[in-house]
Image: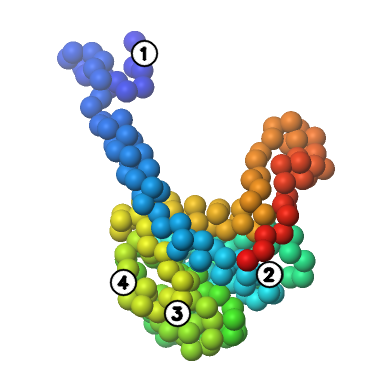
Amino acid sequence: MTVHPGERLDPAAGPVPAPTGAETVVKQYVDDLTLALAQLETGSVTDLLETLVLTLHSGRRVFVAGNGGSSTAAIHIASDLMAAAGTLGGAPQVVALTENIARITAIANDHCYDEIFSRQLTGWGRPRDALLLLSVSGHSANLVRAARVGRDLGMTVLAALGNAGEVARLADRLVVFGQADYGLTEDLHVALGHMAVRVLRGGDACRFSAAAADDGPAGAGAEREKVGERGEPRQF
């Protein structure tokens, strides 16, 4: 007897539908995410992205930090921005302060966890660099310290938060989205990074093409150029 997906085997009655409630959850999540996007303050997002992109255009560095799911979002965003910023010429630098676990654990062990980002900034941060902080609560002590050190160093502090906590008071540019829901806010963190990439590319999207992939690296590169590796420079 075959048990199909969505069914469980009951020794007495045979296969019956498994009441997971997954469909209801999926629909509700889609509705919640759609509402979060509809409520996005596009003016605030634009201000933050323009500041971020202008920092890279000027040859300054961008640092990104967050905890938990936001720590991996920081790495994702930094990686994407580095790839997109390569079209600017020079050597733009985007650093995720979460990517070196040895450095993070050393600082936490030798000093305290609240300083894992601020101590990195003390060594690397310079005036007119940008610091992008990702948080759901907006109250994380290590992000608050990073924001304070960033301001002391003359950096521009950017924050993308699910809740306007203490970090919000220290930010030069601020976006609050996701209604303090961890899943929605972290989804929007990654979306924010992808928006920044499109701005760097002049608004062009980069889409995968199976035909180009079959042609190897050269073909894939040609497809990226076709879609638009970099559009007309955007003026701010």
* Front-most of residues 55 and 119: 55
Of the residues shown, which amino acid type is indicated by label 2? His
Q: Nearer the viewer, mark 3 or mark 1?
A: 3
Labels 1 and 2 touching (C-beta < 8 A): no
Q: Which residue is mark 2?
A: 57
> Image quadrant of residue 77?
bottom right
- Pointer 1 or 4: first along the chain: 1
- Pointer 3 or 1: first along the chain: 1
**Cα gap from disc 4 to disc 3, whole angstroms:** 14 Å
**Cα gap from disc 3 to disc 2, whole angstroms:** 23 Å
**Cα gap from disc 3 to disc 1, whole angstroms:** 57 Å
Of the residues shown, which amino acid type is indicated by label 3? Ala
Instruction: Tell me if residue 56 comes above or below residue 182 in the rendering.
Output: below
**Left or right: where does residue 231 sit relative to residue 154?**
right
Instruction: Tell me if residue 182 comes above or below residue 103 in the rendering.
Output: above
Q: Which residue is mark 1?
A: 2
- At 58% from the left and 63% from the top, the residue drawn is 78
Q: Which residue is mark 4?
A: 165
Of the residues shown, which amino acid type is indicated by label 4? Gly
Instruction: Tell me if residue 223 comes above or below residue 115 in the rendering.
Output: above
